[in-house]
Amino acid sequence: MTAHLYAMSKGDKQVEVTDYYEEDQPTVRVQLDPLLTPNENAQRYFRKYTKMKNSREVVTEQIEETEREIAYLDSVLQGLDTATPADIEEIRAELTEQGYIRARGGRKGDRGKKKNDRPAILCYTSSEGVPIYVGKNNTQNDYVTNRLGQPSDTWLHTKDMPGSHVLIRAVDYGEQTLKEAAMLAAYYSKGKESSHVPVDYTKIRLVRKPSGAKPGFVIYEGQKTLFITPDESLVRNLPSVVKKA
């Protein structure tokens, strides 16, 4: 419109202009406010464009934040699926800490002090005698990944779905241990009832938690992927114990 001010006059209700941004440069009919000058009409459209652009950016940010909230709550629901009473207490404490539920005897958002106690972690022993730790909720996942794991340990997690952080506590281990750890990652995930569940694995030194991220959220690189069909009987046959990490 700015390039066509010469073609407009105050009192016009519309104007036909060339759209120079399109390859074939079509003619576009634009509605005008007859009470405004040509320049005022152009500025009015520019303000409208700026407002819509800013609104789109805000809405995009809100959509991304909502998607992160949904992913987080999906992880909480997945943790509840196999939770013991002790696990449920940890999940309650986590949701209180995050401001989703009321603290007992307090109001919603009364977060109090976060517990520093080490959580009790489910530890399996592979058929090769290697310990495999499984975090069953976000509190345990954070501990397994950010505190328990050593740089040379191997970390596993289902690809693109909520699930446990699984840790092979060994520098050297065989293919059977890797498959059993991947089985545990698939079994303690949203893909428990599925087949050919993708499980990523990488060295834990390549896993990190972004600053300000929700509990249980990490990013990682250098991963390889196994496809596992969960088998409850195989999981139950692996020796396991719940112990302080």
Image (cartoon, helix red, strand yellow):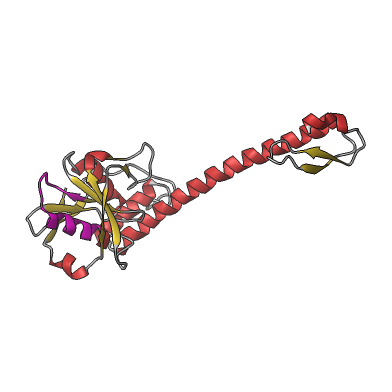
177 or 138: nearer the eye? 177
Assign the N terminus to one quadrant of the image.
top right
One can see residue 125 in this view: no
- Identity of the residue drawn at 47% across and 51% down: 67
Residue at x 68% of width, y 38% of height:
51
Residue at the front extreme of this rendering? 24
Q: Quadrant of residue 36?
A: top right
From this view, report whether residue 191 is shown above or below residue 4.
below
Residue 182 falls inside the magenta stretch = yes
Is any part of residue 167 visible from this angle?
yes
Please provide the residue range marked out in magenta.
167-185
Residue 79, percent from left and from top:
31, 58
Does residue 18 lie above or below 225 as drawn? above
Q: Residue at x 91, y 33 (%)?
A: 10
> Taking 60 as reference, is 161 left or right?
left
Residue 65 located left or right of residue 121: right
Q: Position of residue 14 (x, y in %)?
A: 86, 42
| Residue 71, percent from left and from top | 41, 53
Q: Residue furthest left?
A: 129
Front residue of this view, candidates 218 and 25: 25
In the image, what residue occupies the spot 85% across and 31% down? Answer: 38
Residue 8, how many percent across, how many down? 88, 33
